[in-house]
């Protein structure tokens, strides 16, 4: 168990002990209205009710169409939040004590427990894509305790556990652990943290008695819960967009892989068909050379033989390049760069300062080099490219004018392109291969009159 998590459990236990010493106040059945809201505050509360109800109905509609548990849990959490606030206002706020008339401490406990249950179920589903099942055990324990408290409330007309440990504490515990464990946070995750953070801050301040001490009466809790409703709705929508983008990207990558596999099969057939004629030509030239006495003719035959060998090697390089095999092997960096250049059909200067080999999928590495070279070649026809090999890095520099500072941070994003008739995933694939498949790093910067792509292992 992590030290930080142990510390958090100690804090929760300490709060529980402190609450026990004030059990008479906590379990008191007082239901008299003690605060009064003027017209402006009533309007603010009503607006907040409208926001919370709207987000609940919106997510119910999404659940109806998408059949996603995430939307259902969030919609139910919002509905019980609304019922909790209405009941709370009926008990303690004028004029809501007469407007709603729901003066029930029993229902207040029930709604509060259900808020906790469905909020935790929503958080559990939401953070699963970040952490898998790492926090499932913690959330399940809290859910079992909440369900037990729900049963206790039904039997004895009031809750026990949520009286001494308010629901914002277990939610804080789960979210703080999620924030500690999630390494790569995105916008939806920050929406989740900020939305609940506002609520936890307001509830925490009110819980320690600041409102009673200061005499400041304002619907802060209503505003915080309304903000939370909006932010979490944004988080769900944004997360759905990211999932759709990822699915669309996977389809594109699958099609590209299928295309490469088809090309590999076609080239394999061509290689098979060419091999016999090339062998025949090579054998014929050897026979002619034996019978020939002319020096110039022998030199021509030698050059022709070299061309045949070159054709044979080239077709073999193409066949290996488009082989979809994921097999890893030890390969020489310079040789693989040279193979990629033959595919690209472009002259590139290779400066090998400190040679090295690498254990990975050779074809994928050559595809990375090819994607980067083609990117420069598409910008400038007579581009000059230099590949510098200096263990453990490979730098590819060009003189194609560099990359606009406004877009340099976006060029590795999928579907981002400034060229016509381009799908915009070449550099994304290159970065994915280097960083996810090969454990390296691919970066870009502007140098001189061009760009510099650097692969570091």
Image (tube, rainbow, N blue to C red):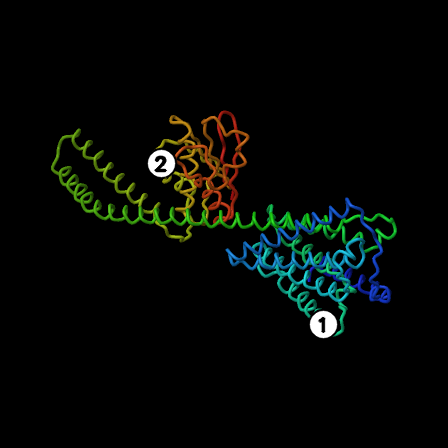
Badge nearest the viewer, 1 or 2: 1
> Of helix, strand and loop, which one carries label 2?
helix
Judge by depth and name the residue closer to the eye, 43 or 179.
43
Q: Is residue 306 left or right of residue 334?
A: left
Mark 1 and mark 2 lie on one chain; the one further toward the N terminus is 1
Judge by depth and name the residue closer to the eye, 416 or 225.
225
For label 1, count other residues whose C-alpha is less than 10 Å away and answer few (under 14), some (14-19) or many (20+).
some
Q: Residue at x 70, y 49 (%)?
A: 48
* Extreme-left residue of the structure: 291
Judge by depth and name the residue closer to the eye, 339 or 67.
67
Judge by depth and name the residue closer to the eye, 5 or 98.
98
> Residue 409: image x %, image y %?
54, 36
Q: Is residue 428 left or right of residue 182?
A: left
For label 2, count other residues whose C-alpha is less than 10 Å away and answer few (under 14), some (14-19) or many (20+).
some
In the figure, residue 74 lies in which quadrant? bottom right
Q: Is residue 401 left or right of residue 24?
A: left
| Discs 1, 2 touching: Cβ within 8 Å | no
Q: Residue at x 52, y 37 (%)?
A: 410
> Residue 219: image x %, image y %?
77, 49
* Extreme-bottom residue of the structure: 155
> Residue 336: image x %, image y %?
39, 42
Q: Residue at x 80, y 54 (%)?
A: 93
Q: In this view, does 443 lie above or below 358?
A: above
Q: In this view, does 31 lie to the left or right of 412?
A: right
Q: Which mark is drawn over residue 284?
A: none
> Residue 388: image x %, image y %?
46, 34
Identify the residue under disc 1: 154
Identify the residue under disc 2: 344
Q: Quadrant of the N terminus?
A: bottom right
């Amino acid at each position: 168990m992590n030290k930080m998590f142990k510390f958090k459990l100690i804090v929760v236990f300490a709060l529980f002990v402190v609450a026990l010493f004030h059990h008479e106040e906590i379990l008191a059945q007082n239901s008299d209205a003690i605060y009064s809201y003027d017209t402006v505050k009533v309007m603010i509360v009503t607006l907040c009710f409208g926001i919370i109800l709207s987000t609940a109905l919106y997510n119910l509609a999404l659940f109806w169409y998408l059949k996603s548990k995430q939307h259902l849990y969030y919609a139910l959490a919002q509905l019980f939040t609304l019922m909790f606030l209405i009941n709370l206002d009926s008990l303690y706020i004028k004029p809501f004590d007469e407007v709603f008339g729901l003066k029930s401490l029993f229902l207040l406990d029930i709604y509060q427990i259900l808020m906790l249950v469905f909020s935790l179920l929503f958080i559990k589903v939401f953070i699963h894509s970040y952490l898998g099942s790492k926090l499932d055990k913690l959330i399940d324990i809290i859910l079992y305790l909440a369900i037990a408290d729900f049963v206790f409330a039904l039997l004895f007309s009031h809750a026990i556990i949520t009286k001494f440990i308010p629901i914002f504490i277990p939610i804080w515990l789960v979210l703080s652990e999620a924030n500690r464990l999630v390494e790569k946070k995105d916008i939806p995750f920050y929406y989740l943290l900020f939305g609940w953070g506002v609520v936890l801050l307001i509830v925490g301040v009110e819980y320690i008695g600041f409102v009673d001490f200061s005499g400041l009466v304002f619907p802060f809790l209503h505003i915080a819960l309304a903000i939370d409703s909006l932010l979490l709705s944004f988080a769900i929508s944004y997360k759905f967009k990211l999932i759709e983008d990822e699915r669309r990207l996977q389809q594109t990558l699958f099609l590209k892989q299928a295309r490469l596999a088809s090309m590999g099969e076609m080239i394999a057939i061509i290689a098979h068909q060419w091999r016999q004629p090339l062998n025949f030509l090579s054998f014929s030239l050897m026979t002619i050379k034996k019978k020939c006495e002319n020096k110039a003719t022998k030199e021509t035959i030698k050059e022709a033989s070299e061309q045949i060998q070159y054709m044979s090697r080239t077709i073999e390089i193409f066949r290996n390049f488009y082989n979809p095999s994921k097999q890893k092997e030890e390969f020489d960096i310079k040789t693989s760069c040279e193979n990629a250049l033959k595919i690209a059909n472009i002259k590139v200067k290779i400066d090998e300062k400190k040679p090295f080999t690498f254990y990975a999928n050779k074809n994928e590495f050559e595809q990375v080099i090819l994607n980067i070279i083609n990117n420069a070649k598409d910008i400038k026809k007579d581009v000059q490219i230099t590949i510098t090999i200096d263990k453990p890095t490979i730098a590819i520099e060009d003189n194609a004018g560099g990359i606009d500072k406004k877009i340099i941070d976006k060029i590795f994003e999928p579907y981002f392109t400034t060229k016509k008739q381009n799908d915009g995933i070449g550099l994304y694939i290159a970065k994915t291969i280097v960083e996810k498949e090969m454990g390296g790093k691919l970066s870009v910067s502007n140098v001189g009159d061009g760009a510099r792509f650097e692969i570091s292992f």
